[in-house]
Amino acid sequence: MTVGMVGVIGLGKMGLPMAGHLKRAGHLVTGYDPSDASRDTALAQGIPVATSVAELARASAGTLVVVGTDNQVLDVCCGEGGIIASAAAGHVIFICSTVSPETSIEVGTRAAEAGIEVLDATMCRGEVGAIEGDLLVMGAGPEDILQAWTETFSCFASDIVHLGELGAGQVGKLVNNLLVWVAAVGNYEALRLGMRLGVDQEKLRTALLLAGGDNQMMRTWHRPRPMPWAEDDMSIVMGRADELKLSLPLAGVVRELIKDIKIRKREWGVDPESYESMFDFVEWVEAKH
């Protein structure tokens, strides 16, 4: 199904490759980013860019919001010259950013007054998934609208699921982030233990993939593993748990272990946000021992 012009707001590490996949698949796509450098990079890749959020919203049937924070989502969607103030009735806003469920719901409430639909479309599998076009999209909101846009999302996502009412996609991403970092820290400690006991890391990893130790992070252990948001992810999890009076002690431990990993990466001489694999990092840690 052709849905019309697709707008992408936020042409960074996630939004730019998503826009590229849409263009290569033959979709009409326009991007916007406040950064001159990001707009120039998009133009160099043949992706048209708008001069403002308002211009993009007026020209698009729907907009993918791929910005960094709750405040940025609120500004882009609800601010002066934002999507809600500029788009025609029937426009669809997809919140791809990781924000609080309340932020999604607030945008949805304010958009409804203008006849604009809002859905969560949170994304898992990170920058590599965006580049390779095999993201997981966790959708929430009107299911029929998500289904109508399935062909569009399939340009950059191999899996698309619907979790429920608006806000549920943000809950899904929150829970996924918790499990991702639990697995990453668990793998790090387990493989170091195995190496310390004399077993080659790759041989051990390959064996674990055939056993109960198998997990997605273990399967992608050789992939680049930037960790810019890891501590923030865990802080958000812990904050929500505190609000619910739910004890999640593992989340606190994992956050502190992530800090330790980042400190060790800096000692290694590598930026924690860099594209070094955890496999190489563990090799360095144990060689240093």
Image (cartoon, rainbow, N blue to C red):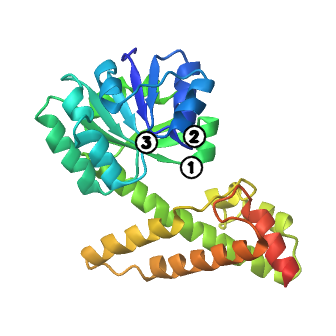
Q: Which residue occupies the foreground of this view, 20 or 167?
A: 20
Please state if 100 lies on the left or on the right of 286 as rendered. Answer: left
Residue named by callout 1: 126
10 Å crowding of disc 1: few (<14), some (14-19), many (20+):
some
Residue drawn at the location 29% of the way across and 28% of the way down: 54
Q: CA distance from mark 2 to mark 3?
A: 12 Å
Q: Residue 279 in the image: state x and y as whole percent.
A: 77, 64
Instruction: Quadrant for residue 40, please give it.
Output: top right
Mark 3 touches mark 1? (CB < 8 Å) = no
What secondary structure is found at the residue carrying circle 3? loop
What secondary structure is found at the residue carrying circle 2? helix
Q: In the rendered image, is residue 78 in sight?
A: yes
Q: Is residue 85 above or below residue 26?
A: below
Residue named by callout 2: 130
Q: Is residue 164 above or below residue 87?
A: below
- In terms of sequence position, does the residue under pointer 3 or pointer 1 come before the other? 3
Q: Which residue occupies the foreground of this view, 260 or 34?
A: 34
Mark 1 touches mark 2? (CB < 8 Å) = yes
Q: Residue 2 in the image: state x and y as whole percent.
A: 40, 14
Give amino acid for label 1.
Answer: Gly
Give amino acid for label 3.
Answer: Val
Q: Quadrant of the C terminus?
A: bottom right
Please state if 108 lies on the left or on the right of 190 as rendered. Answer: left
Say the numbered circle drawn on residue 66: 3
Q: Is residue 94 above or below residue 27?
A: below
Q: Which residue occupies the foreground of this view, 217 or 93?
A: 93
Q: Nearer the viewer, mark 3 or mark 1?
A: 3
Say the numbered circle drawn on residue 192: none
Q: CA distance from mark 3 to mark 1?
A: 12 Å
Q: CA distance from mark 1 to mark 2?
A: 6 Å
Instruction: Quadrant for residue 102, please give it.
Output: bottom left
